[in-house]
């Protein structure tokens, strides 16, 4: 029952583990798996139905990879991968997330110092043992120590970045929905609320046949270790060491269960108190009428349990979307009919941070990217390939002008969609931008972003941004801090000062939907919303497979309480173009 997405996940795990095994992310085998993954994404077909002969016909898929895919589809496992997993357990693989610790260094630390996990690495650093290894010194030892702290890799509160958890949860939920015995399934918990890091994944399944669901889950290929194996609950660890709790409930209790397991805990407590105040009892099975004290237990009538909306309604509240459920005013606002008209995916009319293979890191052509945008139903689009200052990935002024002509040619086939010739400008160390101001002014639309110099002071970083915001050729600020969640902290900014500037110069703040980024973060979005800063939600796609990020961007914006009307790419074409042109 493996899907193409499962195959892609399998290949990506092979990439990680083979890089460790070969001591290099550039080895021939690693590149082969990587290339195969990209090729399968581009191909777009369901690869689980293809034979080895058909698989190798896909440009980029070699014989060895094809037979591994076939083995995976036929048996649910790959022997080579199982072997790698044994030799590189999750706690060891986790070490490769530390910036400055490449596969070679890891192999050395393991061979010379017997380091198998973060705790052992910490201990080695405490005894200054790391600096004795060839190629490492006191400075790199200190840098690694700092990175471990920053990533929160130690202790019980170890958390998984959303980018590692959400695609996995989506695959599992899809697999479960594929079972005929499953009426409904959804992931809940912090993941559904769009937290940036996740403690564990909570999946709730509606079914009358829990035994079928549980036996399916316990034999799923993502299971590395069973933690709990009960009649209606299974908890397991994935090969990456992430815990997944799957619970089965009766279909008519699905709403009460998803409400409970979505949390947050503080939101649940506030709802339960609201129920008590109204002579009701709220638990994971339903909202129960307790007004008749003569009735006990099961005799008491159930008011609502099937859907979350019915439960909120019975509590005198509008439906509260999951990203808002953090007990930060949403219940009071709901009670007062003061919740904003939140931005939704269906409101989005265009994508305004969008790359093609004109960028060194872009992987689909202008033709492919434009067609994908058109298939998404967009009314407008800004193609924003990198400006010249971004080494390797950027384009010269001449190349950009040719690109404009090319885009105009492609645009002829899409008369119902307005395609803007844009640019992702690079914000330099002290706020400088690409090209000269006259050339920059030619672009129909720009997004300016930080791609380097992450270590300056708050004052320097804020000044740098202010300079970009004040530039009359800048429409929006992209991926504000440049962070990679759980991997690289972003730049530190004085948000109040930055927000003042966004207001003054009427520049939009991007919510970047790439799961590694989700930048600006939801708490910054909420600050910006309080000042009516314009927002723009983008995918920053570099390939046609990445357009789905829009949904993640929207949910992050919702978590920041973003109202529809502040999001410029929810506006109709005329209104959006009027704003873009007036700058
Ligand atoms: P995480 O996993 O640490 O990222 O955060 P959550 O929010 O997913 O927390 P988790 O997995 O411990 O529990 C899932 C949900 O179950 C939580 O959001 C609310 C609900 N829940 C868990 N324990 C309690 C509790 O003691 N009281 C209440 N009211 N709800 C709870
Ligand atoms: Ca959880
Ligand atoms: Ca849990
Ligand atoms: Zn960028």
Image (cartoon, helix red, strand yellow):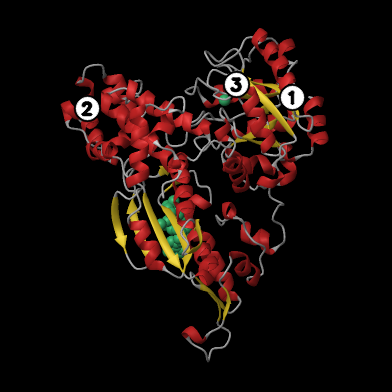
Residue 408 spot, x, y in % from top left: 74, 19
- Ligand 2 visible in quadrant: bottom left
Q: Assign a secondary structure to mark 1.
A: helix
Whether residue 376 sits left or right of residue 79 in the image: it is right
Q: Secondary structure at mark 2?
A: helix
Residue 109 - label: 2
For label 3, the residue is 464
Q: Which dot marks residue 142?
A: none
Query: In this rendering, is residue 379 above or below 166?
Result: above
Q: What residue is drawn where x is 67% and y is 61%?
A: 334
Would you name the residue on which mark 1 appears?
Answer: 411
Q: Residue at x 32, y 48 (%)?
A: 156
In the image, 244 versus 493, the foreground residue is 244
Counting from the top left corner in percent of width and height, residue 174 is at: 49, 52
67 or 521, nearer to the observer? 67
Is 27 left, or right, of 107 in this rendering?
right
């Amino acid at each position: 029952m493996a899907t193409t997405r499962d195959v892609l996940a399998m290949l990506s795990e092979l990439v990680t583990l083979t890089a460790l095994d070969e001591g290099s992310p550039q080895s021939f085998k690693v590149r082969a798996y990587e290339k195969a993954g990209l090729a399968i994404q581009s191909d777009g077909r369901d690869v689980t139905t293809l034979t080895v002969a058909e698989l190798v016909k896909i440009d980029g898929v070699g014989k060895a990879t094809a037979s591994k895919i076939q083995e995976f589809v036929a048996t649910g496992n790959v022997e080579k991968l199982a072997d790698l997993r044994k030799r590189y357990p999750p706690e060891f693989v986790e070490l490769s997330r530390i910036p400055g610790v490449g596969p070679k260094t890891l192999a050395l630390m393991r061979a010379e110092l017997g380091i198998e996990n973060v705790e052992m690495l910490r201990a080695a650093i405490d005894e200054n043992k790391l600096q004795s290894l060839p190629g490492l010194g006191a400075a790199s030892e200190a840098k690694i120590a700092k990175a471990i702290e920053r990533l929160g890799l130690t202790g019980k509160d170890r958390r998984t970045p959303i980018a590692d958890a959400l695609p996995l949860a989506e695959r599992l939920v899809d697999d479960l929905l594929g079972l005929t015995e499953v009426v409904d399934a959804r992931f809940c918990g912090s993941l559904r609320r769009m937290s940036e890091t996740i403690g564990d994944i909570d999946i709730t399944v509606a079914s009358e046949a829990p035994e079928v669901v549980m036996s399916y889950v316990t034999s799923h290929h993502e299971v590395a270790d069973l933690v709990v194996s009960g009649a209606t609950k299974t908890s397991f660890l994935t090969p990456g060491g992430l815990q997944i709790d799957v619970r089965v409930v009766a279909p008519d209790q699905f709403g009460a269960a998803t409400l409970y397991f979505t949390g947050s805990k503080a939101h649940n407590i506030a709802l339960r108190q609201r129920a008590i105040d109204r002579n009701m009892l709220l638990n994971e099975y339903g909202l129960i009428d307790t007004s008749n004290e003569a009735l006990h237990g099961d005799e008491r009538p159930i008011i609502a349990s099937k859907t979350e909306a019915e439960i909120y309604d019975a509590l005198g509240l509008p439906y509260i979307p999951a990203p808002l459920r953090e007990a930060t005013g949403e219940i009071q606002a709901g009670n007062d009919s003061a919740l904003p008209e939140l931005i939704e995916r269906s409101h989005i009319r265009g994508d305004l941070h969008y790359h093609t293979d004109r960028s060194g890191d872009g992987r689909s052509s202008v033709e492919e990217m434009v067609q994908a945008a058109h298939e998404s139903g967009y009314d407008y689009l800004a193609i924003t390939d990198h400006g010249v200052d971004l080494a390797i990935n950027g384009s010269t002024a001449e190349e950009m002008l040719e690109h404009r002509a090319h885009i105009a040619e492609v645009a002829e086939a899409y008369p119902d969609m307005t395609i803007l010739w844009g640019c992702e400008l690079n914000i330099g160390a002290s706020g400088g931008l690409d090209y000269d101001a006259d050339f920059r002014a030619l672009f129909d639309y720009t997004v300016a972003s930080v791609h380097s110099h992450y270590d300056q002071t708050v004052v320097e970083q804020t000044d740098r941004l202010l300079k970009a915001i004040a530039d009359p050729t800048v429409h929006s600020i992209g991926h504000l801090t440049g962070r990679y969640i759980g991997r690289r902290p972003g730049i530190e900014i004085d948000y109040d000062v930055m927000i003042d500037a966004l207001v003054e110069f009427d520049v939009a703040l991007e919510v970047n939907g790439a799961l590694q980024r989700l930048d600006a973060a939801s708490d910054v979005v909420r600050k910006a919303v309080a000042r009516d800063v314009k927002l723009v939600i983008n995918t920053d796609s570099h390939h046609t497979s990445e357009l789905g990020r829009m949904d993640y961007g929207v949910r992050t914006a919702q978590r920041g309480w973003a109202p529809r009307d502040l999001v410029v790419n929810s506006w109709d074409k005329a209104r959006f173009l009027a704003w873009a042109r007036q700058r």
